[in-house]
Image: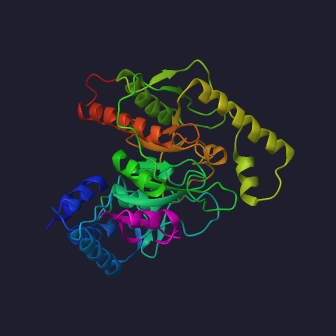
Amino acid sequence: MISTAEYAALSASDIARHVNRGELSAREVVTAALARIMERDDAVRAFTGVWEEQALARAAELDARLARGAVLPLAGVPIGVKAGEGADSFQNRRLAEAGCVPVGATSVPRTRQGWQTYGHTDRGPTLNPLDPAWSPGGSSAGSAAAVAAGLVPMASGSDGAGSVRIPAAWCGVTGFKPTNGLLPSRDRAGLNSPGVLVRSLLDAAAYLDAVASVRTASAEPAAPPTAAWSATLGYADTDSAVAAAARRAVRILADQGVLAVSADRPLTLDDPAPAWTALRAGGRLPADVARAVAGNTARLRDCFAHADLLLTPTTPHPPHGHDGPGARMSVALTWAFNITGHPALSLPAGRTARGEPVGLQLVAPHGADARLLDVAARATRALSTCAAAQGGGCAT
């Protein structure tokens, strides 16, 4: 049997490898996941419901298939399912076909009023595993918290304005939003893309292959990809401490040869708030809003004609408390790419001087999802190496 601590240390890719080799059964893994949730979730409140009976039955079915010779890319991997999306959504069906086992529904905000970047359960608000005083972000709050707490290695989310990337940044995990339209949108406006929360970039790549049959490259590129950096996108009120932490991560990546960063072409977009609101409401865009959308699209097209990636902080401010964000717009740096549809992800980029988690957002051209994940995997390794060495040999 596998202990809950051993289970929590495994990535989704680790689990699938062990289960496919017969070193662990799907039932053993799912039993450990359910035990881990029972032990730890009262301190996090990531789940609004746990599907114990269904999960164990699904695990038994998988073990029977594997005994007959089946090999599944995500065999026996327990996943959390964003509440409101359900196990029958397109991406969750695809994940189940790849061998995943849904173990429960993860929390979302109680209402749709205001910019609520936190989760709600009948036991109280979802707590950030990094510090219970902080919001975990939202709206995929419980999914991020469940992954960060080691309850599951992978959880589904959806991202209409940053709802995967923001909680990833604040919980210290990775959140990936594919190119809009690669998977069926969850709203009529096409803003809301399915997405995933993981601790390992290998797991994000396995997710993309499972849900969209897109595989990342394995070979090292001949030269580092080029990247443009912007702390504000020309309009966001980004805290200096957050910008500094994200920029420090960018310098590490440049020093380690992961990226070649250029500051020669500063990017200035129009604030996407009016456009996002108008698109979400439906109907014809006012002329000035349509011009702003066209202008941002053209500027991003020019940006990606000269750079492979665009880098920004994921959020303009650190995690707020459970009283809410107030007037601050947590989505200020993310929702532009729901409008334009570019693939984007957030990876952990360190902390501010006060210890607050900061995410680094990587944005790629349309359809470059696989390349984005490949670069992000190399970036994560470089940042982790520097962190393990306590800054030795890395930019400060």
Of residues 261 and 48, the one drawn nearer to the viewer in this rendering = 261
- The quarter of the picture where the C terminus appears is top left
Name the residue at 48% across, 22% down: 261
Q: Is residue 348 magenta?
A: no
Looking at the image, is 381 positioned above or below residue 266? Answer: below
Residue 182 percent coordinates (x, y): 56, 52
Position of 351 with respect to 195 (left or right) is left
- The quarter of the picture where the N terminus appears is bottom left
Position of 170 with respect to 388 (left or right) is right
What's drawn in magenta, residue-wise?
A: 77-104
The outermost residue toward the front is 69
Q: Is residue 96 magenta?
A: yes
Name the colour scheme: rainbow
Position of 278 with respect to 301 (left or right) is right
Position of 209 with respect to 190 (left or right) is left
Of residues 116 and 161, the one drawn nearer to the viewer in this rendering = 161
Residue 150 percent coordinates (x, y): 30, 58
Residue 60 percent coordinates (x, y): 26, 76
Name the residue at 52% across, 65% down: 90
